[in-house]
Amino acid sequence: MNILHLRYAVEVERTRSISKAAENLFMNQSNLSRSIRELEQSLGITLFKRTSKGMIPTTQGEDFLRHAKRIIAEIDEVEALYKNGGDGKVRFSVSVPRASYISAAFADFAAELPDGPAEVYYKETNSLRAINNLLESNYRLGIIRFQTTFESYFKAMLHEKDLQSEPIADYACRLLIRADDPLARRGEIAISDLADYTEIGNPDHYVPSLPFTDVIKAETSEVVTRRIYVYERASQFDILSKVPRTFMWVSSIPADLLEKYGLCQLPCAEGERVYRDLLIYRKGYHFTPLDRRFIQLVQAHKTVLDLRESK
């Protein structure tokens, strides 16, 4: 087995076709088939099964390909770093939930980047895509978000995918509404107060092994019947600031953003759900100084928000 065998198998999985993979790899189809058979023989397992949908990995094949992609990504990273003496380029990549305190930390992080060539990726997405970005797209870090009641599902998935994790923050949902909304002047808000309001929601919910309908049920209230689902965080704030009788459930929002959009955040005891933000990374990965600085800034921003809310 060599690195070419790994690349061959990954391409077959990607295209689901020996012929298409051979074309993309600029090699003869029979030679590719022979290489896959040799790889299977050396491993003692069957990697693929032929179906009406093409070449589909077996259970053992899925496990092997997950490791193969990781190895290829690490080799590509080393080659890019040291080929021709290294290009001296700063590299950083992270997938995160749509969280204002994290984006504020990233803004500070970006302001501190050293002079010279840089290649930085900051992707706001859901937990499944953050995990897949680590496994398949060579992202170095990820932060995933989930209700603490679902922690066992995520821990099982991370273990299966051979990923490590560290807690970043726990928080109870806060109600985000316009500062001039009548509810903003109340000392206490009940879920029933929101019955005639429109919720601005994030449609990107995901919990491993749970049907989407069950996840949505856990993330929403039956009292609210009007919802607008928006993927992009700035658009969510725009709608909240411009459309009366709208609200959103959020983690802590920095004060400058609340002021910019004319919003306020309030506790709502009946609606509080506890969430956890978890840092994830590949097993055996060693943090770079940039990685550590980003994590430090994220934790610092969360601490500042916690202190503000405790006053």
Image (cartoon, rainbow, N blue to C red):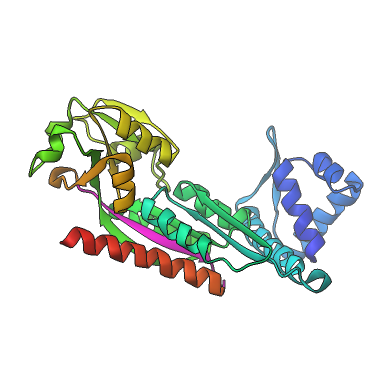
Which residue is the extreme one toward the left?
187
Q: Residue at x 33, y 57 (%)?
A: 276
Q: Is residue 63 left or right of residue 191?
A: right
The percent position of residue 256, horizontal first and vertical second, equals: 32, 51
Percent position (x, y) of residue 100? 38, 51
Residue span colored magenta: 272-286
Q: Position of residue 152 (x, y in %)?
A: 35, 57
- Say if 257 sits above or below 177 in the image: below
Asked whether residue 242 is drawn in magenta, I would say: no
Q: Nearer the viewer, residue 11 or 137?
A: 137
**Residue 34 or 123: which is nearer the viewer?**
123
* Residue at x-position 70% and y-position 65%: 77
- Which residue lies at the image location 22% right of the left edge and 46% below the top edge? 265
Q: Is residue 284 inside the magenta stretch?
A: yes
Task: Using the rendered image of the protein, determine whether residue 232 is visible from the camera's viewpoint.
Answer: yes
Which quarter of the figure has residue 278?
bottom left
Q: In the image, what residue occupies the spot 37% across and 34% down?
A: 238
Q: x and y percent of residue 1 in the render?
A: 79, 66
- Residue 28 vs 157, above or below: the answer is above
Q: On the picture, is 288 further left or further right than 3?
A: left
Please state, as top left, top right, bottom left or bottom right, where the C terminus lies in the image.
bottom left
**Main SS of residues in magenta:** strand
